Amino acid sequence: MYQLDWVTQIKSGKARTLTSPPALAVSPTVWRLGFTSFFTDVSSEMVSSILPLYFVLHLHFSPLQFGILDGIYQGAAVALLSLVSGIYADRVRRQKEVATAGYALSAVSKVALLAAGNILPVLAGVLALDRIGKGIRTAPRDAMISLSSRRDRLATAFAVHRGLDAGGAVIGPLAAYVLLRIVPGAFDLVLVASSCIALVGLGIIGLLVEKPHSVADSRREMPSLHLSFGLWKQPRFRALILAGGALSVATASDGFIYLQIQKNSNSSMSIIPLFAFLTALFYVLFSIPMGKLADQWGREKVFLGGFATIVVIYGILLTPELGRNAQFAVVGLFGAYYAATDGVLAAMASAILTPELRTSGLALMNTATSVSRLVSSVLFGWLWASGTMKTAVWVFLLGLLAAVLMSAWILAQQRSE
C-alpha cells in the first residue's frame, strides 16, 4: 500500500509538481496559490472579456448603464466585504478557509449570470455576487503569499502569483474569442464553460494549499477591530492608501479602453476579447521582470512608472484613427501597467504591515482601490454619455497626471520622515 497519495505528496513537497524554480526562490505555497488563481482567472476572464460586447452591443445598454455595471464588477462588491473578511481572517487565523469560501462564491456566480437574462438589477446583483467572492478571497490570499515569502523578495513572490493569474487571463479571453467565433452569439456556452473551469481552481486551494506557519503556529493575542481600523493612523500605510486610491480614480477600466481602441481602429466587434487576451499576455511577459526590478531598483519607482504608461495610452487613444500597430501597442502598454502596479502595491503594503494585521491591512488597501475603481467607471461612463468618449479620455488624462504627481510627493514625504 502506498504511504503517500498524490495529494499528500504535493502538499508535503515530495512531488515536483507546482514547486518553485530555484532562480526565483519563491515558496511552493505561492505557486499553488498561483495555479488556483490561474484557473479561476481563466473562468473570470472568459466572462469579463465579453462584458462590453455582451452589455453594450448585445443587450444594448447605454454607456452610463455599462459604467454602473462595470463599476460593480471592477470594484464595488470587492469593497463591500474585503475589509470584513480581512479582519475576520486575522482574528480567527483562518486565511485559507476564508479565501476558499471566496473562490467558491465566484464559481457559483457564473451560472447565475446566465440565468439573470437582461434584467439590469438582477445582472447587477449577480456581478456583485461574483465580485463579493473576489473581495472575500483577495486579502487572505495575498496575506498567505506575503507570510510565505522573504521580505526582500515580496515583489517577486507577488509577481510570480500575478504572472500565473495573468496566464489565466491569457487563456480566458482567447477561449471566449474562439467559442464566439465558432458559435456566434453563444454567450451561454461561454458562461457554462467558465463555471466548470472555476471548479478546478477551487479544488487546488482546497486540497493542496497549506496555511503559512506564521499563521498556523501563531500564539499571539487576536487583533481587535480597533487595531485593524487603526492601521489608517500609520503614516506610511495611509500614504499608500491615498496614492493607490487617487491613481485608481483616474485610471479607466479595461472595458472602456477596449471600446475606444475598437472604435478608433474600426476593428470588428468580436476583437474585444482578443484585446483582453493580448493585455494578459503582455502582463505575463512583464510580470516577473517587473517584480524583480521592483525588489532591486525600488517598488515605488516601478509602481508610479506603471501609471505613467496609462498616460501614454490616453495620448494614443486621443488620436483620430488607430492603425493595427497602434492598437496592439496600446494593449501591450496596458499589460505592462498591470505588471508594474498590481503585485507591487501589495508588496509595498506587506512590507510595512505586521503579520498579525497583514490581512486586515491588505483588505483596507483593496477597499480603497476598489471604491476608487467604482468611482472611475461611473465617472467615465457619465462623461461619455453626456459628451463624447474623447472628452472622458481628456478629463482622465489630466486627472491621472495630477494623481501621479501628488502620489509621488506623498510617498516621497513619508519616505523622508
Image: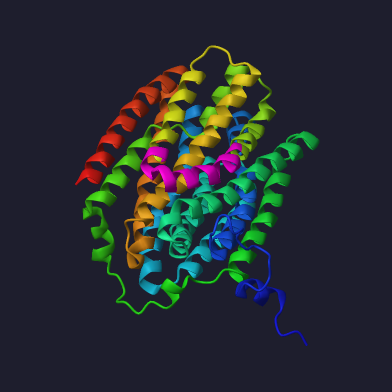
Q: Is residue 142 magenta?
A: no
> Residue extending furthest bottom?
1
Q: Quadrant of residue 403?
A: top left
- Residue 163: give x, y in percent of width and height: 57, 48
Chief secondary structure of the magenta span?
Answer: helix
Tell whether 82 sits left or right of 193: left
As rendered, which of 409 and 266 lies closer to the eye?
Answer: 409
- Residue shown at 71%/78% (left/top)? 5
- Residue 284: give x, y in percent of width and height: 60, 43
* Magenta span of residues: 282-302
- Residue shown at 57%/23% (left/top)? 261
- Residue 414: give x, y in percent of width and height: 23, 45
User: Does the image show residue 69?
Assistant: no
As rendered, which of 185 and 405 lies closer to the eye?
Answer: 405
User: Does the image show residue 370?
Assistant: yes
Q: Is residue 368 above or below residue 49?
A: below
